[in-house]
Image: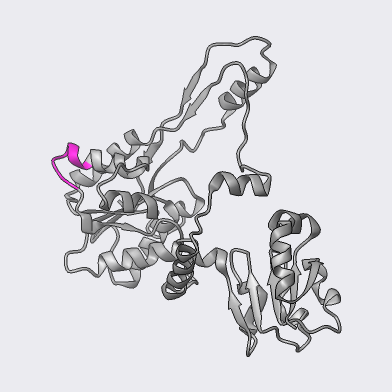
Amino acid sequence: MTRIGLSATPELFERLFTEGQLEELRSLGELHLHLDPAHLATELAGSTLDVVVTTWATPPVREWTDGRTPKLLAHTGGTVRPLFGDDGVPAGCVVVQASAAMADGVAEIPDATRDRVLAVAEALGYAPDRAACSLRRRSTEQICLVIGGFDVYREPESGAMAEAVAHLWATGRRRIAYIGRQRETEQFHAGEHVEGERLVALEAAVRAHGGRMEPGLVVAGADDRAQGYRAASALLCATEPPDAIVSGSSRSAVSAIWAARDHGCSIPEDAAVLGAGTIPEAQVTRPALSTIGPPTDADFDDLAALLFDRLTEHRSAPWRQVARPWTYTRRGST
């Protein structure tokens, strides 16, 4: 009989499995429930499990297998790497990591693996529902207030983007590339409405100077540093490389500077680089990264005042709006 161990705290276990699902699991084999991830080694002492389902906070495999390697290890967290450390996957153990395999932008999951997982999900008719997931987690990951009136806080980006593009245009840049997030770049290439303000603002600014965004220069890669590096490398190695790269995040813009350096390009002579968002690294890269982002001197006192005014106001008051436009900070990369 197959022995199955579920490493989940009682609280998490109740959220993960319904009674019907429990019956299904019991029909598959001998089930060991409520294994506390922090004390997995003690719970498994003297027993050999064929299948182990792990969650967040599970210690490294070598601390709880005691030489008895499970045949299948299924992990529900964002990455399995902390489970193995430098030892690698135990011999004879198959690892399944469904949550990461179904998520775009997880660099350590091979495309072939992700395609197989998504194919199975499609065959089963699985489609995650955000509202249902929030109900199951008992958390919407949002702060909501229902008060007799509301205020609006905005950080418009278009003005800063227009100023940055005006500088790029004045310095002779015409082939402007954009490294964006997966969703907005897909919408751009599909001819759909682009939800991201950044790419919309860039397009508008380029059009204002009589130019256009070339489809081949709009790529995904702003979601993490590794993707940003690969995206910038591909752009710079193209037959007709861009003379400016605008990134949807400053993290991937820093990676673009590294990629340019590794490919023998000079910044900003061969290609200018602009990031979006204010991060400390922008000032210590070489050259320093030019950015658009919130004013560096913003202390958000006015935003806090709006919130407390609403909480202490006994009657409904007219709604108010606070707009703090982003600014363009020119440094060495442009």
User: Foreground residue, 136 or 18?
Assistant: 18
Q: Position of residue 329 (x, y in %)?
A: 38, 42
User: Foreground residue, 101 or 155?
Assistant: 101
Whether the magenta-drawn stretch holds residue 209 is answered as yes
Q: What residue is drawn where x is 21% and y is 42%? A: 206
Q: Residue 45 vs residue 200: left or right? A: right
Query: Residue 86 occupies which quadrant of the picture?
Result: bottom right
Q: Position of residue 144 (x, y in %)?
A: 62, 31
Q: What residue is drawn where x is 24% and y is 57%? A: 217
Q: What residue is drawn where x is 50% and y is 55%? A: 127
Q: Position of residue 49 (x, y in %)?
A: 75, 81
The reply to whether residue 121 is visible in this rendering is yes
Decide: is 187 above or below 48: above
Whether the magenta-drawn stretch holds residue 143 is answered as no
Decide: is 264 above or below 129: below
Decide: is 274 above or below 236: above
User: Foreground residue, 83 or 294?
Assistant: 83
User: Foreground residue, 145 or 267?
Assistant: 145
Q: Position of residue 200 (x, y in %)?
A: 30, 41
Query: Residue 143 occupies which quadrant of the picture?
Result: top right
Q: What residue is drawn where x is 69% and y is 71%? A: 53
Counting labels gives 0
Magenta stretch in the rendered image: 206-212
The reply to whether residue 243 is visible in this rendering is no
What is the quadrant of the N terminus in the image? bottom right
